Amino acid sequence: MNINIVKEIVERYGTPLYVFFEEEFKRNLLELEASYKKIYPTFQIAYSFKTNYMPAACKIALGLNEYAEVVSDLEYNMAKEYGFSPDHIIVNGPGKWNGLREMLDDGSIVMLDNAYEARAALEIANTLDHKVNVGFRLNFPIGTGKESRFGFDVDDRATVNLINYMRNCEKIRIVGLHFHLGGSRGLDAWRQRAVKIIKYADALLKDNEKKILDLGSGMFGHMNPKLAAQFNQELFTFDEYAEVVAGEFNRHFSHLPIEERPKLIVEPGSTVIANTMIYATRIIAEKTIRNRKILIVDGSVHQLGELGKKKQLPVHVIKETTQDAKESYAEVTGYTCLEDDILFRNLKSNALVGDCLIFENAGAYTNVMKPPFIQVGCGIVSFGKDGLIRIDKRQETVNDILSSYFI
């Protein structure tokens, strides 16, 4: 991150504000792809829309021939609007019922989550004049002690029966399997993902149905060492993940011609987008309560996303004031009326009212999850190739919030 560039952007567009670094995002995607493809060439990234569906990011992914991974009709329609071909859209999650007919009719890849969804897909398919593409999200342990609520239980005979039944339906084309378990970023967990999805593909699918084996998301990405230290575990590189995951696929499928091998898919979100955005907010007031120094800013922890609530994101001070000040410790708090709206708990700095604070790693689950609570959503500015600065999203207005209400 270039502080001088951020300072220029903040001076021009004000705060609070997100700044997106396009080339950093592109580098992350290309590095991840290269790590896997050098071991298993039949590899494909499907970028996670739910993590950050801003057009600037999604169109970069599109330009690199990545797929889109979506979990609702909202995100599905966004992907099509941006230009993703339906057959390059993977539909996941339990909440896609509203657009299921369109998704199936278009030819997208629909990963079924439960028997009710499978029944709906069958009913829709029987009304169409072509086959539809479906896969199955599986639920199995990978040694982390965590249990997922998603997908089909591999130990339930009903899962086998359902797959066999759908295989014999004229309008159904089975294309593969999916697995994901949040918060499981270790190498051993990823090795188990690969080993087990291959195992169940061999057990549940015919050779011509192993088109796609999708391992979801949850790899560590690049981050500031101050943030990395807060995870209290070893962090791994793209090459290390690729060695265990693509390595398993290569060993199992190397006897097949490359064009006949299953496509190994991962669905990175935070992995590739988190470190490509910063969040800028300005100090608007200062006070002390029983020796507790508090800096109040025009932003909120709710704009820092889920990670910003669990970890202390690396922060930089941009001095806009000329007054000298000694370094001291302070709590940085937001504009809401909630006691837990704390952006940083023990910031040591010489920051004064009028200065700006810049938070790193603000690209994941931030602008897409921020509710219209107390304040409108802030704008987004992109910094692109050759120093091009572009407004990606203007700050919201009261009319934006009220437009869906009847007054």
Image (spheres, rainbow, N blue to C red):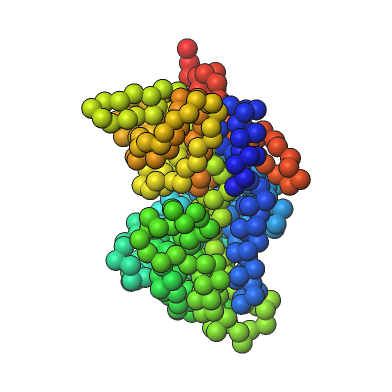
Find the residue positioned furthest to the bottom. 255
Whether residue 381 is situated above or below residue 101 in the rendered picture: above
Residue 112 visible within the image:
no
Q: Relative to the observer, which residue lies in front, 89 or 97?
A: 89
Q: Could you tell me how many numbered marks the image carries? A: 0
Find the residue positioned furthest to the right. 386
For the point 23% across and 27% down, the residue is: 290
Whether residue 32 is situated above or below residue 404 in the rendered picture: below
Residue 273 lies, in percent from the top left, at 56, 51
For the point 70% across and 58% down, the residue is: 65
Picture quadrant of residue 153: bottom left
Left of 306 or right of it: where is 65?
A: right
Picture quadrant of residue 109: bottom right
Residue 35 visible within the image:
yes
Whether residue 80 is situated above or below residue 191 in the rendered picture: above
Q: Relative to the observer, which residue lies in front, 176 or 8?
A: 8
Picture quadrant of residue 339: top left
Q: Relative to the observer, which residue lies in front, 286 or 401?
A: 286
For the point 61% across and 70% down, the residue is: 35
Residue 15 lies, in percent from the top left, at 54, 28
Residue 309 lies, in percent from the top left, at 37, 43
Find the residue positioned furthest to the top. 407
Left of 137 or right of it: where is 65?
A: right
For the point 62% across and 52% down, the residue is: 25
Left of 41 or right of it: where is 396?
A: left
Whether residue 190 is situated above or below residue 231 in the rendered picture: below
